[in-house]
Structures are given as C-alpha cells and as structure tokens.
Amino acid sequence: MREVLVTKGLTKFFEDFKAVDNVNLILYEGTITSLVGPNGAGKTTLLNMISGVIKPTKGKIYFMGKDITGLPPYKIVKMGIARGFQLPSVCNYLTTLDNVRIAILSHMGKVRNLFSPVDKDEEAYNKAIEILKTFGLYEKRDLLAQDLSHGDRKLLDVAMAFALEPKLILLDEPTSGVSTSEKGKIMSTIERVIRERGITALIVEHDMDIVFSYSDRIVVMHEGKIIADGKPSEIKSDKRVESVLLGVG
Amino acid sequence: MIEMTRFILDGFFYASILFLISSGLTLIFSVAGIINLTHGALYMLGAYVAAVLIKMLIDTPYAILAFPLAAFIIGLVGIAIERGFIKWIYEREFVYQLLLTFGLALVLSDVTRIVFGTEPIYVTKLYIYAGTIDILGSPYPVYNFIVMVVTFLIGGLMWFVMFKTRAGRVIRACALDREMSEAIGINTSKVFALTFFMGSALAGISGALVVPQSAAMLGIDADALIESFIVIVIGGVGSIKGAFIGSLMIGLIRAFGIALFPEIELAIVYLVMATVLLIRPRGLFGKEYRVA
Amino acid sequence: MGLRENLVSYKMLLIVGLIILLAIPLLGSTYIDFLLSMALIYAIWALGYNFLLGYTGLLSFGHGAYFGLGAYTVAMLVTKYSFRPFLPVLATAVLVSTFFGAIIGYLCARHVAKYFALLTLAFSQLFYALTFKLYHWTGGSDGIGVKPPDLFGIKFSAIENPVGYYYFTLIFFLLSVYTGWKIVNSPFGKALQAIRDNPLKAEAIGIPVKRYKWYAFIISAMYSGLAGALYAPLFGHVVPDLFHFSFSGEVLFATLLGGHRIFFGPIIGAIIFTIARSYITAATIYWPLVLGSLLVVTALFFPHGIIGTIYVMLRRRGLQR
C-alpha cells in the first residue's frame, strides 16, 4: 500500500525536555490511524511537527515522497495536509459560513483576489454550504464563530480542515468537549467523510471505545516514544499498552 | 588612541543609562506582559524631578539624595499608573494595552511640560563639581565613571533581589507562569504593582543620572523609549543578559557614531536593529516563540 | 430579520451621507470647506490604517511616516524642484510612501504583534530624526512651505480655490472608499480577517500569513501616502512633526473613535475627530493631554468605538428576533 507519510527519527527538544523521541511512523493511503497515549506523551507535538507549526530538532518528515521537514505551515497545507486543533481554532469575528468559505477559497487558490466580492463566488459558496450541511452547521451559518457552542466550534475547526480537500488529515481530539451522546454521531460523520474521499487520517483520541470502533491501526505513544504500533486486535492484547493507558478513556 | 578611549568610555556611559532603562522595561514586560509605553515619559519625569531636587539641594551635601529620591518618586508614579489604569486591562487584547499606555504616555509627557515648562533645566554644577580624572593624559569627567559604578551597583542589587530574596523568587515565578503562581497562593496583583514600582524606579533613576551630564528637557521621552526598545529587541525580550549586551552595543555605537558621523548617528542604530531583526527575529537572546 | 432591515437603512444612510458631502460647499464657508477637506484626508488615512488594525489585527504606531512621506514628496517636488503638475506629483508621492511602506513593512510584518507595534514606532522616529539631520534638503525643523501645484496647467491653490480643492479631495476620498470596500469584501480581505482572528488557523488553511501581513501593510501605506499628498497643498506647510509618534496617535485614535471593527467606522471617526480637534485646539494649548486622555478613556471604556458600539448593539438586537 502506498506510503503517504513517513517520519524518520523525528525528535523534538524543548530546552532540556524531550517531547518527542525518535519517532518512526508510516501512514498508509486511505487508512485511519489513531494516535493514543497519556497526556504529555508528545502526540500534539508530533502533529505540530508534521503540520509545520514547530520545527523538529532532529529527523525528517516525508509526505508523498517529498521532504517537508521544516517547511512553513501554509506550504504544507498547499501540498495536501490539513489539521484540526485540540482547542478549537476558528476565526471568531467571521461567520461560520465565512470560516469554511475562506478555507475553500484558500484551497482554490483564490485568496490573492483583491477585487471580486466573496459573496458573488457561487462555486465557493456551494462548496461551503455542502460542508456545513455535512457537519450539521448549516443552520448556524450566519452566526459569528464566537457565538457558537464549544462543540460546534470544534466541528467548525474540523470542517475547515476538510474544506481543504486534503490527502492527509491530522485531527487532535476531534470529539473532546462534545457531549457523550454526540460523540458517536460526530465521529461517524468524520469517519464517513474520510472513507468516502479516501483521505488518510491520523487522529489523536482519548476515548478508547471510539478508537477501537473505527481505527485501521493504532499507534501508542508514551513519554515521546512510540511503544506500540499495530492493528486494534494486536494493541488490545498488548500488556505494556494496557498499563500505560490505564486511566485513559 | 586617546580619542578611542574617550569614545569607549562614553559608550560605557550611554550603555549604563540605557541598561537601567531597558532592564526596567524588560522587567515589566517579563512579569506583567505589558509593553509599557509610558516608560520613556517616566524617564523624562525622573530627569525633571531630579533636576529640581538637585537645584534645591545643590549647596548642601544632601544633593546626592536627589537621585534615589527621584527614583522612589517615579516608582510611586509607576504604581499609581498601574493600579489606576493598567490593572484593568491585563486580560484584554493587547491592542488596548498598547493604546492605554500610549495615551498615558502622551498625558504624562504633556503634564511634565505643563508642570516644568518648556525650557530645559541644567545642573552642570554637579557635573563639574565631580571633577575630571586623567586618562592617558587627557581629562575625563569623573561623573561618567560614577554613573557606571552606580549602574553596576544597581545591577548587582537587582540581581541580588531577584535571585537571593524571597520577593525576587516570587516575581520570577509570576514571570514564568502567572496562573500557576496564583494557584499556589501568590498575590499576583501585589507582584505586578511591585514590578511596576521597580521598573519605573529604574526609568526614574536613569533619567536622574543623565541630568548632570546633559539636561532635563522635553522630547527625551520618545528617544529613551525607542532606544530602550531597540536594546530589548536586539537583546531579546525578557532577558537581562540581552539588555546588558544590547545596551553595550547601542551605547558604543552611539558614542562612536556621534563623534565620527554626527549626521547619521541615529540611523546607524536603526540599521543595526534592522539587521539583527532580519537575521534573528527574536533578538540575540530572546526565547523561541511559535509561528504567528 | 432585524439585520436585513438595518441593511436597507444602512444604504439610505450612505446615500444621505454622500449627498451631504456633495453639498458642503453650498454652505459658502471657506473655513468649513477647508475643515471638511482635512476631514476627508484623515478619513482616507484612517481607512488605510484600518486595513492594518481592523482587518489584519496589526497595531502600528508609526503610520505618520507614510503620511509624512507623501506630504514631503509633494512639498519637495512642487516647492523645491518646481515640478507642479498635481496628478503626476500625487502619483509620485503615493509611490514613495508605498516604496518605504514595502521595505519597512517587510521588516516589521514578520514579527509578532508586540514587536510589530514598536518597530513601526521606531521606524517612524527614524524618519523624524532624519528629517532634522538632513535639514539642507528637508528644511529641518522649519519644514517646507508648499507652493500651489498645477492642475491641467492651471494653478490649483487650496487657499484661492477651496471649493475646487474640496471636490478634488472628495473624488479621491470616494475612490478610496470604493476600492477599500472592494478589497475588504474580496477573498483577500477575508483572508486578512482570518489572520486577525486567528493567525495560527489562517496559516493552517494555507494562507501565507507573514506575506499577507506585508501586503496589508503596503496597501495601508499607499492610502496613507495619498492622504499625506493631498494634505500638503491644503495645509500649505510640512514639518517633521508629521513623523513624530504623537501624530501617528491621531490616526489611531480617529480609527478607534469610529470603531475599528466595521468598514465605515474609521471614516466617521476621522471626520468627527478632525472637526472636534479644530475646536479643541482653538480652545486650549493642551492638545497632547486631551488626546492622551481620550485615548485612555477609549481604551478603558469604549473598545468598539462609537459606530462599533452602535453596530454591536444593533447586531445583538437582530439576533434576538
């Protein structure tokens, strides 16, 4: 199967603290990989390095065969990687519609446009509406993002990532802050979109029930290192993993 | 050779003054997260207050007291500003913080003008009184040396307070992590007020020390603010070591610049700043900060 | 919906405003023509300034620089080099300020907001210092008296022809508002707003944040240069104080007075500011004190500005229906 993302010896030091320790990870096309582990294991830092927000101290990252180590985030996005954030990251003073729309316009390469009104762009508008409907935000499209509930802001953050029509999507706890009853529904929407479009996904998640329900593969991190990497059935029976994840989810 | 030595000594003199102002600015920024634009105006006010005090006490041995007194008064002004105005906007978007301190700077600067008048105040008597000392056969003002020594002492005092006293440890804790500090029971409100006192006092004393050598006059607020800021930008925000190195650099550049290229002296300083920023956006010793 | 009703009355207000602006000279007062010309110039400046503040979220303390550069360019061309055709002179002035805006913007825009603000201040003060030092060229603290330029070969003096100069300024004002509106509602404009609200997320959706901040800076410098260029013949004199940070404080205040979060805020703010200032400076010598106090009050109590606060109130009501 095609290798979409490969990291080699990826390491990150914050002063003396080793946040990520020699991570070798391969993500295969069209698969959903869950990244699990206790808080502080280095999961978000790993996502930050892949998406370009932080520069690795050591190691390399390859996307579709190209070296993307240390590239600025917007270039990495243009190459086809999108990401959702742990704390919902949206544009507060833009409407829900505009939030998604600007992501779409960016993806369509239209943000350089200085003169034609955003409202008149039908293609962007239709695409935005489609995404809003998929994620159940259509009714709230005219609300300012700051007026949305936490769960909706989380959804918007994720929706904007999907609006970029990425090849690889990195999601950081997409269901955190969402009520338990909603979690399943949201996760199944996300899974459906991923499967339909053949997107490769790396999802950080704490809720192990959810993780086991959709993952093709599970990677377990602890203290910056990967301590287990395999199919859900393998991970379930791994004793080391059990002790590390005790108390999680 | 004699000239070189003069320039270097002048450079150290400027550097001393700059170091005092910049450390005050960077202290306030590290702890309270505020870029205090009133800092320049406080410097100017310190100069005027000291000038007036010195003039009053010039014929007595108490003239020396003018300096710590000026520092103390300016420190109080700093607390007043912090308690009266700044404390309300800690949680707000920093646009408003800058706007507030900017407005306060304008007010303070104009109040200084109203109270002290538009004419500069000179106290060269004190400068001359300190006498000169022979350096390589040519006389150099003792006063400049005194300033350097005083700066050194103040620097040492600051170090002692920050690293060897409980108050210092508390301040440093707040600088590192305000929320955590509050969570363990530190009264951050008091810490901020204290920090503003110290930072403002530093601005005040540096203004005071400059007066005998030049004068208390209008307009030095903007220059002081800009230069101390350049020092911090070059040296890296939040770093005393950076303020030290930065002050040294700018002080020496100024000294050589004024003497050798008087027309574009200030421009050289800005050029250095621009170069440093191009190569190393966070300054020589600044902490790494994330994208955007 | 309540908001839509407001939209219609919004358009009505604009038309009424336009009619008023067109009719000002009919009042027959030279002073008012002069004052409103100045108000429109400040409005252009504030509009450009708000690209940076309201739409990209960058606070500049040194925008007097680009205004000053535009003004000085006009002064030098017309007075010192006797080059008088106004339109080419205006164009040159805008080019000069845009050029420096591009350089300084490049150096400043790469930085986080706190550094940015003070860097812009530092560069403006640099121009202030240079203007004094290069006094053979710039006239030093005396500044340069601005002789009247020519428009299509005929002498075009703001003093002799205040009505003409007013309409001339009005044309550029309307052009600025029109292009500004277009830019703000374009994909680029939305991208700037995304940067303002969340630079991390903006970068995460593929917007090259640093580069776009730079573009916003350039556009902003362009408008400021135009304002300064129109200012020079009107005021008749250019002085280094244009580069001083207290002058930059004026456009900041005018913008915030109106409200930096909506398009017309700065325009209204600038007009009110100019008119108010002419009355205040006539009444007292403590202008920096007054300005500073007003800034303090605005920072503490009116973060949305006048128009902004009204808008927020209307929006809240619209939502509740």
Image: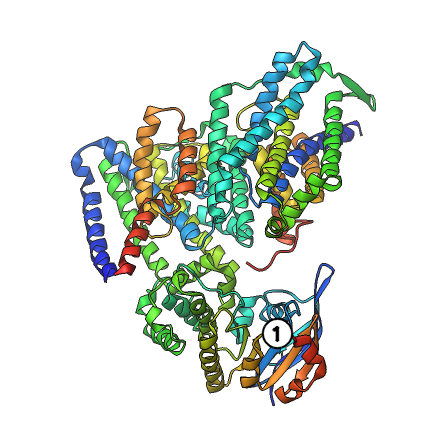
- Looking at the picture, the colour scheme in use is rainbow
Q: At 61% from the left edge and 77% from the top edge, which residue is drawn?
A: A35
Residue A46 lies, with reference to residue B230, above or below; the image says below
Residue C291 lies, with reference to residue C45, above or below; the image says above
SS of the residue at dot 1? Answer: loop
Q: Quadrant of the N terminus of chain C?
A: bottom left
Q: Quadrant of the C terminus of chain C?
A: bottom left
The image shows residue A155 at horizontal and vertical percentages of 45, 71
Q: Chain of mark 1?
A: A
Task: Please tell me which residue lies in front, B207 or A213.
Answer: A213
Residue beneath label 1, please? A248
Residue C83 is left or right of residue A11, and the answer is: left
Task: Please tell me which residue lies in front, B170 or B207.
Answer: B170
Q: Residue furthest right?
A: B136
The image shows residue B32 at horizontal and vertical percentages of 58, 44
Residue C22 lies, with reference to residue C184, above or below; the image says above
Q: Quadrant of residue A42?
A: bottom right
Mark 1 residue type: Val
Residue A82 lies, with reference to residue B183, above or below; the image says below
Task: Please tell me which residue lies in front, B290 or B278.
Answer: B290
Q: Is residue B122 visible?
A: no
Residue A120 is left or right of residue B233, and the answer is: left
